[in-house]
Image (cartoon, grey):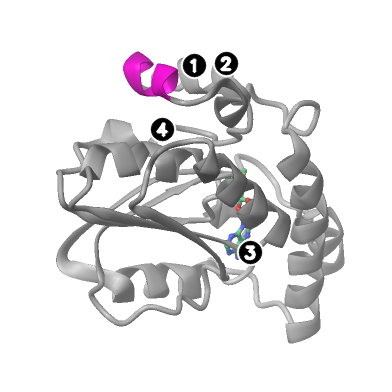
Amino acid sequence: MDTQFTAEERERIKQGIRQKYAKVAAGPEGNFRYPTGRKGLEEQKYDPELIDSLPDNVAASYCGVGNPFRLGPINQGATVLDVGCGTGVDSLIAAVMVGPDGRVIGIDLTPDMVQRAKLNLGKTSLKNVRFLESSAENLSFPDETFDFVISNGVINLVADKAKAVREIFRVLKKNGKLMMADQILVGHRPGDTKSMVDTWAG
Ligand SMILES: C[S@@+](CC[C@H](N)C(=O)[O-])C[C@H]1O[C@@H](n2cnc3c(N)ncnc32)[C@H](O)[C@@H]1O
């Protein structure tokens, strides 16, 4: 169940995330307890051909926690939204999968991550991807826009998870598919909301 945060607490959580991920945009090394970059992609069993298709410094910026593409194929010509795209690695992989007739949009809360994703895109020849700054809780797309929504390591960071999930299903087409990977907390969470807010992006 979602914790009910005040508007001020939600804003502090978002500020904490923007601060942490501004650092991560420069390079994920040393910021996570799990493998990132090329090693992370290999451990999460991304298709080796797709890993090799990424420029080295693009693969190095990956900080996902799992592999949404293991949940099924993404077809040519599909429209895909990557929620919390970070530096855009999954968006770029999806763009190869959907081909020139498909289209991918990656959104992220942190402006530095969106900038890095655009820089990463510029290192490829892909023409079917766009990156925008936006929050998962307020997606600026009409209802039933996307065939697929992918997300990797993001919803655990969102203060209003129920709202984000409602938004995802609003923008998915009727037979659309959500493919997400995430972390869950096993065990006790901090008892009071102040500690939760203070440690949110830690
Ligand atoms: C662990 S990184 C994962 C990035 C990317 N999905 C990947 O696999 O490399 C988490 C990302 O979620 C973004 N994020 C956190 N809260 C968000 C929110 N409410 N809306 C959109 N993005 C958010 C962060 O800015 C960060 O880029």
Disc 4 to disc 2, C-alpha distance = 13 Å
Residue 186: % across, % down: 60, 39
Q: Amino acid at mark 2?
A: Lys
Q: Amino acid at mark 1?
A: Glu
Q: Earlier in the sequence, mark 4 or mark 2?
A: 2
The residue labelled by disc 4 is: 67
Give the label, 3 or 1, closer to the camera. Answer: 3
Residue contact at pointers 4 and 2, CB within 8 angstroms:
no
Q: Which mark is residue 109?
A: 3
Give the label, 4 or 2, closer to the camera. Answer: 2
The residue labelled by disc 1 is: 43
Q: Residues within 10 Å of mark 2 (few under 14, many from 20)?
A: some
Q: Residue 7: which quarter of the image?
A: bottom right
Q: Residues within 10 Å of mark 3 (few under 14, many from 20)?
A: many
Is 179 or 73 nearer to us in this picture? Answer: 73
Q: Earlier in the sequence, mark 1 or mark 4?
A: 1
Q: Is residue 51 magenta?
A: yes
Which secondary structure lies at badge 2? helix
Which secondary structure lies at badge 1? helix
Disc 2 to disc 1, C-alpha distance = 6 Å
Which secondary structure lies at badge 4? loop
Which secondary structure lies at badge 3? loop
Q: Earlier in the sequence, mark 3 or mark 2?
A: 2
Seen in the image, is 134 located left or right of residue 17? left
Residue 164: % across, % down: 48, 70
The residue labelled by disc 2 is: 39
Residue contact at pointers 2 and 1, CB within 8 angstroms:
yes
Residue contact at pointers 3 and 2, CB within 8 angstroms:
no
Residue 161: % across, % down: 52, 66
For the record, the magenta segment spans 48-53
